[in-house]
Image: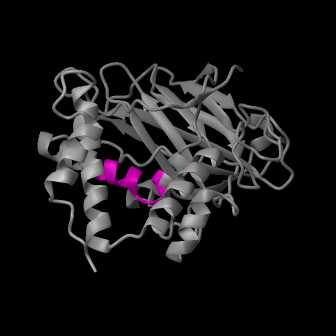
């Protein structure tokens, strides 16, 4: 039974007062957004006859989400981060921008502060007996096909246990294990010498998995590697590629998979000469195409709170 009190003067006056929407003080944009979100929440309570018990269960859940530090993880799991990518893709289409490497979600596990090395970087700083060596290499170009020298490629991924350094609950990894940054050479080439990652799952007792359980959904991701790529006069790219053959590629709880972001994995030998832990290794070639600035500005840069550390 819907009580339908949303449109009453009492509730509408409450919304105006709570968000100070007509007041001269405060941030106008923030007030506009909060007024809309609070209005939608009040309307949903009316339309769905959400009970006080259910409201307070939601409030308690938000408290738990904050204690677990999983708000960004939940944003990925509920498709919010993917939705933002969909909007940016559409904005690019309307602006006539095409030809670049597809974007996809950043996720919650980036750490700023990795030292930038020239050309190539060895990023498997900690031993991992369960992971074989992997070389990731490619060329960064602009949409005309010209290589971009001095572009910066940042890379981060999980270890063989599905844990990311800096966030590893076991404490087994140093802050920048399996994380690095490379400045491309004169031919636009970059290379990371690392270990093969696996996918990960949401913390099983965490708030995100609790919500996914209520939806009847899993919280697992396929093996993947994250990249930030930036260069002068180009828009910064946020992307990631999946490891070919992972069974969850098209069942990613964070909806990050894209057809063009599944490069082939090739078997190679000669790893000893590269300083790898075995002579046989896997190689992934992942070339990147950056798109130019839009009216002199980079509209792909996303400002959000990110972890940082000192190498």
Q: Is residue 9 above or below residue 155?
A: below
Check residue 64 for magenta coloring: no
- Which quadrant of the rendered structure holds the C terminus? top right
Residue 35 image point, x, y percent:
24, 43
Q: Is residue 52 above or below residue 128?
A: below
Check residue 76 for magenta coloring: yes
| Residue situated in front as seen by the camera: 225 or 57 | 57
- Magenta-tinted stretch: 75-86
- Which quadrant of the rendered structure holds the N terminus? bottom left
Horizontal relation, residue 174 to residue 308: left or right: right
Residue 215 image point, x, y percent:
50, 74
Horizontal relation, residue 259 to residue 164: left or right: left
What secondary structure is the magenta-colored segment mainly?
helix
Q: Residue at x 24, y 21 (%)?
A: 25
Q: Residue furthest front?
A: 10
Q: Residue furthest bottom?
A: 1
Q: Residue at x 57, y 59 (%)?
A: 208
User: Does residue 219 show up?
Assistant: no
Residue 45 image point, x, y percent:
32, 65
Indicate the quadrant where residue 259 lies. Answer: bottom left
| Residue situated in front as seen by the camera: 92 or 37 | 37
């Amino acid at each position: 039974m819907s009580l339908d009190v949303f449109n009453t003067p009492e509730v509408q006056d409450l919304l105006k007062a709570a968000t100070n929407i007509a007041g001269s003080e405060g941030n106008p944009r923030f007030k506009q957004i909060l007024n809309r979100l609070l209005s939608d929440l009040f309307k949903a309570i009316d339309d769905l006859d959400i009970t006080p018990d259910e409201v307070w269960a939601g409030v308690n859940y938000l408290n738990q989400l904050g204690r677990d530090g999983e708000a960004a993880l939940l944003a990925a799991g509920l498709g919010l981060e993917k939705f933002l990518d969909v909007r940016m893709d559409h904005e690019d289409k309307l602006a006539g921008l095409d030809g670049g490497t597809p974007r996809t979600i950043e996720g919650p596990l980036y750490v700023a502060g990795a030292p930038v090395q020239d050309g190539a970087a060895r990023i498997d700083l900690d031993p991992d007996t369960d992971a074989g060596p992997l070389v990731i290499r490619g060329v960064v170009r602009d949409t005309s096909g010209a290589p971009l020298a001095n572009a910066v490629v940042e890379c981060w991924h999980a270890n063989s246990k599905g844990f990311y350094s800096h966030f590893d609950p076991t404490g087994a990894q140093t802050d920048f294990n399996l994380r690095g940054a490379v400045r491309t050479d004169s031919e636009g080439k970059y290379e990371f010498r690392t270990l093969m990652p696996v996918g990960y799952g949401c913390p099983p007792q965490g708030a995100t998995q609790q919500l996914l359980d209520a939806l009847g959904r899993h919280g697992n991701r396929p093996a993947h590697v994250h990249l930030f790529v930036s260069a002068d006069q180009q828009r910064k790219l946020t992307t990631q590629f999946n490891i070919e053959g992972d069974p969850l590629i098209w069942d990613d709880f964070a909806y990050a998979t894209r057809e063009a972001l599944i490069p082939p994995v090739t078997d190679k030998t000669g790893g000893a000469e590269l300083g790898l832990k075995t002579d046989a290794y896997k190689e992934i070639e992942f070339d990147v195409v950056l798109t130019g600035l839009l009216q002199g500005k980079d509209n792909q840069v996303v400002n959000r709170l990110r972890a940082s550390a000192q190498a």
